[in-house]
Image: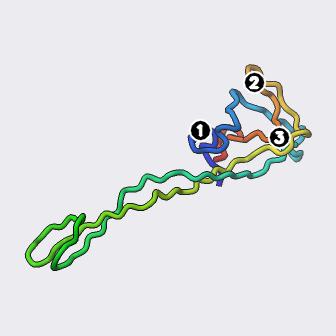
């Protein structure tokens, strides 16, 4: 699955190695049957992100005595005991998938005014095609 926030999510591994370039790159072809001359590859990286967890509490219905450190409430002949268990915080794995450029040597690029770059290079990440997000 392609990630929509590969360059904006603070947990993304691509955030430190890539930067967003202002403007668009226009790739042209001579005939409608021709190839654009750009080879793309799906690439994914994953990171472990800390989860926000609420401590779990277990309610037990007992009759009789209680031990120290346990909150109890008495009602009629039964006692409700609530035990809070503390677990080591678990982390979840987030995967960021992108379309990256492998080769663009056969591509024809249109000249674009007011853009920082006018060509694609290996390792570039494609964020949108024809104005539509790929993630």
Label 1 environment density (alpha carbons within 10 Å; few <14, some 14–19, many ≥20): few
Disc 3 from disc 2: Cα separation: 17 Å
Q: Which residue is rendered at x = 15% and y = 67% of the image?
A: 73
> Which one is closest to the eye, mark 2 or mark 1?
1
Q: Pick out the residue farthest to the front.
A: 68
Q: Quadrant of residue 76?
A: bottom left
Q: Position of residue 97 (x, y in %)?
A: 67, 51
User: Seen in the image, is 45 located left or right of residue 54?
Assistant: right
Q: Which residue is rendered at x = 86% and y = 40% of the image?
A: 104
The residue to which callout 3 is attached is 122
Q: Secondary structure at mark 3?
A: loop
Q: Which residue is rendered at x = 16% and y = 79% of the image?
A: 63
Pick whichever, 13 or 112, lies toward us: 13
Q: Secondary structure at mark 1?
A: loop
Q: Position of residue 96 (x, y in %)?
A: 64, 50
N-term-proximal mark, 2 vs 1? 1
Disc number for residue 43 = none
Q: How is the image coloured?
A: rainbow
The residue to which callout 2 is attached is 116
Disc 1 from disc 3: Cα separation: 21 Å
The residue to which callout 1 is attached is 8
Disc 2 from disc 1: Cα separation: 20 Å
Question: Is the residue 46 above or below the residue 77 in the image?
Answer: above
Q: Secondary structure at mark 2?
A: loop
N-term-proximal mark, 3 vs 2? 2
């Amino acid at each position: 699955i392609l990630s929509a926030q590969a360059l904006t999510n603070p947990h993304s591994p691509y955030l430190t190695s890539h930067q967003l370039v202002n403007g668009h790159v226009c790739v042209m072809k001579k005939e409608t049957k021709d190839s654009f001359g750009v080879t793309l590859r799906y690439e994914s990286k994953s990171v472990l992100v800390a989860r926000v967890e609420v401590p779990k509490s277990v309610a037990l219905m007992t009759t009789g005595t209680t031990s120290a450190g346990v909150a109890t409430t008495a009602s009629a002949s039964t006692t409700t005991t609530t035990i809070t268990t503390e677990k080591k915080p678990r982390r979840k794995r987030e995967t960021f998938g992108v379309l990256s450029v492998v080769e663009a040597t056969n591509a024809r690029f249109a000249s674009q005014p007011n853009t920082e770059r006018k060509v694609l290079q290996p390792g570039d990440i494609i964020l949108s095609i024809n104005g539509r997000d790929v993630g």
